[in-house]
Amino acid sequence: CSLQPAQLQQPISYSFLTMELDEEYTKCSICVTEFSCDRDNKDPEIRKHLPVLSSSQRCDHWFCHGCILREQLRVAEENNGRIPKWLKCMHCREKTSFNPAEPKYHRLLIDLLARAQAARVKLEEQEKRTISAGTKRKTPSETAETAPEKSKSKMEEGTSKSKSDDDDGANTSGGGAASLPPT
């Protein structure tokens, strides 16, 4: 994907910068709870919902930290209480994928989730202001749709005006059609 010089000079629209994240990115695929984006919080219950990326170069799966800790406990029970340092991926079973003691938080996904949350809050605030003002805000697509109608109606006005200019000397009957001048 290469950008042409003309494309580089055009301003970037906000619709290009916005994206929707589906459940694959917003929820853990094991426990199906929403990921947290508050990585600065020290509360372990909130940190359990941060997405953790695999440390393996052959595995690119991610899960919430809570599911990784539960998997660590499950594996420890199977190994007579011996706590493993590294866990296999719960999806592809790749070895040395997750280290529960030193989780590799998925920083890119956390940043995207934070931006999406901030955009959602901003949109809700704008909607509240719009509703309280009692006016409906037009989207760019609605504005583009009404613009040709306005120019079309102006053209029709000009066309009807030129027709009336042509018909100034002619007599018209009640039916609205021009009649022939008497001979």
Image (spheres, rainbow, N blue to C red):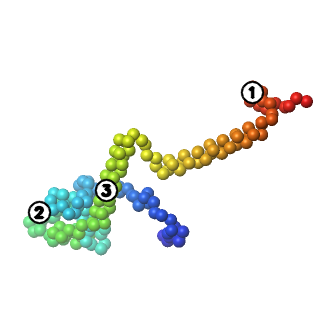
Q: At 41% from the left edge and 61% from the top edge, which residue is drawn?
A: 17
Front in this rendered view, residue 59 or 138: 138
In front here: 81 or 103? 103
Q: Secondary structure at mark 1?
A: loop
Q: Pinpoint residue 89: horizontal percent, then vertical percent.
A: 25, 66
Residue 29 figure quarter: bottom left
| Location of residue 3 with respect to 148 vertically, above or below | below
Number of residue marks:
3
Label 2 SS: helix
Judge left or right: residue 151 versus residue 2.
Answer: right
Using the image, tell me which numbered label, if any, was put on residue 175. 1
Of callouts 1 and 2, the N-terminal one: 2
- Of callouts 2 and 3, the N-terminal one: 2
Q: In this figure, which residue is indicated by the disc labeled 2? A: 77
Residue 30 in sight here: no
For label 3, the residue is 118
* Res. 2 visible in picture: yes
Nearest to the observer: residue 171 or residue 17: 171
Q: Nearer the viewer, mark 1 or mark 2?
A: 1
Left/right placement of residue 105 relative to residue 148 reads: left
Label 3: which secondary element: helix
